[in-house]
Amino acid sequence: MDLQISGRLSKDVTILASISDHNLPIQADGYTQTLEEFDKIYMQLNIKEKSILRAGHLDLVEAKNYFAKYQRRSMGLQFQTEFGKDSKTFVDISAGVARSEFHRIRFQGLKETRDLTV
């Protein structure tokens, strides 16, 4: 199932939304029962051509800074805006929870002594 919505909510606000679910097996009454089971949920509100509010599955990327590059897929919220007429200030705020699994592998080595006689 792929559901996409786009349109204008008011004079200054537009919406873009997408929900996709590719779970199998396909059943007549549906298979996905909770919001967390959808493959991807994404919603974006554009406010007055200056602000963007995103929610859902986000790809957060920062590649401009040499020392703080990151790329993270998360489920969360992101807000971007700019203000100021002469010197524009850009603000980007994000919060989310990673959709990954944590695995730990423990390796317990054995302490051996070797006799190196030549």
Image (cartoon, helix red, strand yellow):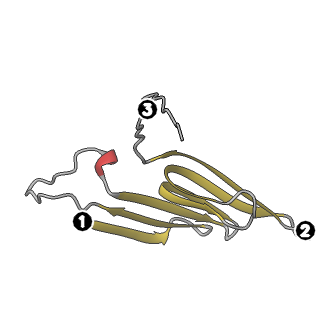
Residue at (11%, 57%) from the top-left corner?
25
* Nearer-N-terminus badge (3/2): 2
Q: Which residue is mark 3?
A: 109
- Please tell me whether residue 39 is drawn above or below residue 11 in the rendered image: above
Element class at badge 3: loop
Q: Nearer the viewer, residue 118 or 72?
A: 118
- Please tell me whether residue 104 is drawn above or below residue 41 in the rendered image: above
Element class at badge 2: loop
Amino acid type, mark 2: Ser
**Image quarter of residue 61:** bottom right
Tell me the quadrant of the picture where the C terminus can be found: top right
**Image quarter of residue 5:** bottom left
Residue 1 disc label: 1
In the image, residue 102 lies at what x, y percent?
42, 40
Amino acid type, mark 3: Gly
Residue at (49%, 51%) from the top-left corner?
74
Q: Nearer the viewer, residue 43 or 115?
A: 115
In this view, the residue farthest toward the front is: 118
Amino acid type, mark 1: Met
Residue 87 disc label: 2
Element class at badge 1: loop
In this view, the mark in front (1 or 3):
3
